[in-house]
Image (cartoon, rainbow, N blue to C red):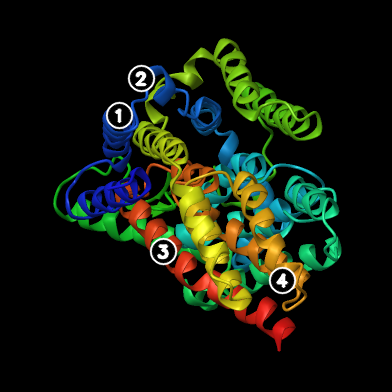
Amino acid sequence: MSAPVLSIIVLVVMFLLATFLPLNMGALAFVGAFLLGSVVLGMSTSDILANFPGGLFLTIVGVTYLFAIAQNNGTIDLLVRGAVRMVGSKVALIPWVMFVITAVITAVGALSPAAVAIIAPIALSSAAKYRINPLMMGMMVIHGAQAGGFSPISVYGVTVNGIIAKTDLQASPMAIFLASFIFNLAIAMVLFIVLGGSRLLLTRTGQLVEQAAESRMAVSVASRAAGVTLQGSGSDISAAGVARKGTSSVPAADSAADSPEAAGSRATFAQVITIAGLIVLAVISLGFKVDVGFVSITIAVILALVSPAAQKGAVNKISWSTVLLICGMLTFVGVLEEAGTITFVSDGVAQLGMPLLAALLICYIGAIVSAFASSTAILAALIPLAVPFLSTGEIGAVGVIAALAVSATIVDVSPFSTNGALVLASAPENVDKDRFYKQILAYSGIVVVAGPAIAWLVMVLPGWM
């Protein structure tokens, strides 16, 4: 049995084990990489570990550590209130604010993971506070990042257009950008409707405060009736204090999160320094293209020195299970590349001799592989494979390239990709990480199955007909 075929079987077995048993797939992936690499391919352990994604490891650790400190000192709540003030009392607009912000950041040249790393923690905290579906909020951030990802000055855009420029194929940078933007916008609209957007249209932030107050009142009355003193019950949106009038207890709205008075309260010194650090993170990592992992962990250490109390427990909030999952899978993908698995599959598709079917299969290959690996690398590898049959003129080159670009990037919602991992790691403590992981995995499975087919139908088939 050839190494590529065996590696595909190992990958399928890993998925089955992680699905039906309580095993971290990252741990399975490290074992698979070790056995496949050392036993089958004869690789040394140093060669296997050369595929370990050190940059991604540092990015996830650095960003989650930084935002854990920001959460501890109340900066996240402050930023959430600021984002909400942008839309007044209209809760339904909050997901769209996050979508637009990430789209703008990537459109002006930022890497998609850098934008998601900055916006996702704020978006997920806002989702928890205002009872927005965390899956919808997280995916809105990722699709926003991908919506702006193919502008002519973005990394994806420059990569794809640069490859096309070296061929005789027709190029249309704006068409590819608009195709990606409209496609991701359409997905965002569907997500908004399916995951509770219609309910949000009827919700105002003030109503959430009243609901929290009523819930607090009910708990207080029940506790007093049972002879128990209420010391502060937990809820999604908690009350900050109890105002007494006579013998009754009247719960006050959360002054730290929702009241107008709190919204206008002054930030503490630690919060000001933290906000300044986040701005520096955005400027240095996005403006000067410095690694976001190194920058974020540097700022986190500085904040820990400035405010030692705020960093207490922050290291424990780093999503270590997510780190294991992602780093293990990407190490295994690197071994797959050494085994020639990706080239084996891609060459088989390119030799079909049926341009329309080949375009569909290449879109699927791009989607499946990109769900685990670098989208930029996949685009750079697969677009050249499409050049031979695109050069025949039997099928529209711009449509195929746009479909491939969309297929290889919309799957970044996968928890095995950088963007999906950052969203998963950014989920606040009140979100069940295992359940959230399964939700993201299920959604990414739908995207991988349906996304390339829809992109092919909309962008490729009309050009062939």
Q: Which mark is residue 182?
A: 4
Element class at badge 2: helix
Query: Which residue is farthest bottom?
Result: 465
Q: CA distance from mark 2 to mark 4?
A: 45 Å
Give the mark nearest the N terminus, 2 or 4: 2
Query: Which residue is farthest top?
Result: 305
Q: Nearer the viewer, mark 2 or mark 4?
A: 2
Q: Nearer the viewer, mark 3 or mark 2?
A: 2
Residue designated by label 3: 445
Residue designated by label 2: 45
Q: CA distance from mark 2 to mark 1?
A: 7 Å
How many residues crowd around disc 4 within 10 Å: few (fewer than 14), some, or many (20 or more)?
few
Residue located 47% across and 23% down the image: 50
Q: Amino acid at mark 2?
A: Thr
Determine whether label 3 and label 2 are within 8 Å by CB.
no
Element class at badge 4: helix
Relative to 333, is 94 above or below? below
Q: Nearer the viewer, residue 438 or 364?
A: 364
